[in-house]
Amino acid sequence: MLVFATSDKGGTGRSVTSANIAYRAALQGADACYLDFDFGSPTAGAIFQIHGLARGAQAGGLHSCLHETGATPLEVDVWNDSDREEIREARPRSAGELVLFPGDEGGGEFAATPAAIERCVRLLARLDEEFDLCLVDLSAGRSFATDIVLEATRAPELGSAIVRWLVFHRWTRQHIIAANGLVYGVGGILDNGVALGHEAKKLQNGLRFVRTAYVDPDSPSVRGLQPPQIAWLHNTDRQLADLASKQRLGQTARLGTVPLDPVLQWREQLILDEDVANRKVANLETTQAFASLAKKLLDTASWEGL
Ligand SMILES: Nc1ncnc2c1ncn2[C@@H]1O[C@H](COP(=O)(O)OP(=O)(O)OP(=O)(O)O)[C@@H](O)[C@H]1O
Ligand SMILES: [Mg+2]
């Protein structure tokens, strides 16, 4: 399965949520890989805590592979190579592979040339055979990376691949309107996809929204606020829910919600069960949300038409 993670705005939580989904999918037994297609800012190595990869690989990453050489890109075994001891030492026997394909340090955006698209098709076709889940983190907004994968997924070599799109957004007016534009607007994913020969209904049925860093006005975390503040949160939450459903990213189009987590507010990282149970720094609801997203993503029954 190929999953393309996108968002209109930057800083939505697209990368950290995608990385945690890949991690939870691996814990659930799926062979998962994460491809850093955020070509302008290839920092996924920091989330997986891979030494020397915080800004991308020195050589042989996805930029070199897709933009220059077509050579097999560098792959990093997160279970073995993470700086975080608990990740290296606590791989359950039942877990699947967890592999990171980093970009190159200093690499930037590059155009969707026929050569880049052809290399992308070859890479995704190979990885789709090797892994149960290939999570591809795209750049924010309308990007070359999005153009490349929209073109690549039309290729006959990827005709039998299951293709899904996750659109990440925060719970604000601006993010909701922006996410709507990215999917349904002029030059958006559906518009561009159809112009490239994708079938509109199929593309749309494979697409869901993910709401990130959500503060539930009923959650214990807001109890310290003043009553007028809590009332305001409730009221605004209702207005946003109304806006989201009018903008076609309401409950039925949503794969899930990740609550605001205190750890993620200050650090982009994988949240381990250890962080919840022993260190008690992250919330159980956060890991449950990631696990639920991974499960729903891989479960075909939850993907019947919108
Ligand atoms: N559920 C959450 N709770 C609290 N903070 C979060 C949550 N999800 C993400 N964040 C934080 O929000 C910030 C942005 O997240 P992230 O870098 O994953 O977003 P992005 O959409 O990939 O951004 P960019 O467009 O820059 O690549 C990070 O500091 C991250 O830790
Ligand atoms: Mg990112």
Image: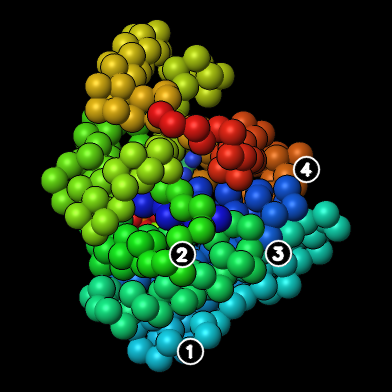
Q: Amino acid at mark 3?
A: Glu
Neighbourhood count class around disc 2 (C-alpha, 10 Å): few under 14, some 14–19, many 20 upward: some
Disc nearest the viewer among 3 and 4: 3
Q: Which residue is mark 4?
A: 278
Closer to the chain start, of discs 3 and 4, is 3
User: In the rendering, at what x and y percent does residue 298 appear?
Assistant: 61, 45
Mark with earlier residue (1, 2): 1
In the picture, the disc for residue 97 is: 3
Q: Nearer the viewer, mark 4 or mark 2?
A: 2
Give the secondary structure at mark 3.
loop
Is 86 on the left-hand or right-hand side of 178? right
What residue is at 42 percent from the left and 25 percent from the top? 252
Q: Earlier in the sequence, mark 1 or mark 4?
A: 1
Q: CA distance from mark 1 to mark 2?
A: 19 Å
The residue beneath circle 2 is: 158
Q: Name the outermost residue toward the right.
A: 93
Using the image, determine if residue 219 lies above or below residue 95.
above
Tell which circle, 3 or 1, labels the residue nearer the N-terminal end: 1
Residue at x 57%, y 69% (from the top left corner): 127
Task: State the image coordinates of residue 112 (x, y, percent, origin top left).
Answer: 25, 73
> How many C-alpha atoms fall within 10 Å of the one at disc 3: few (<14), some, or many (≥20)?
many
Q: Nearer the viewer, mark 3 or mark 1?
A: 1
According to the picture, the residue beneath numbered tag 1 turns out to be: 71
Which residue is located at x 38 percent, y 43 percent?
A: 202
Q: Nearer the N terminus, badge 3 or badge 2?
A: 3
User: Is the residue under label 2 in contact with that under label 1 (CB below 8 Å)?
Assistant: no
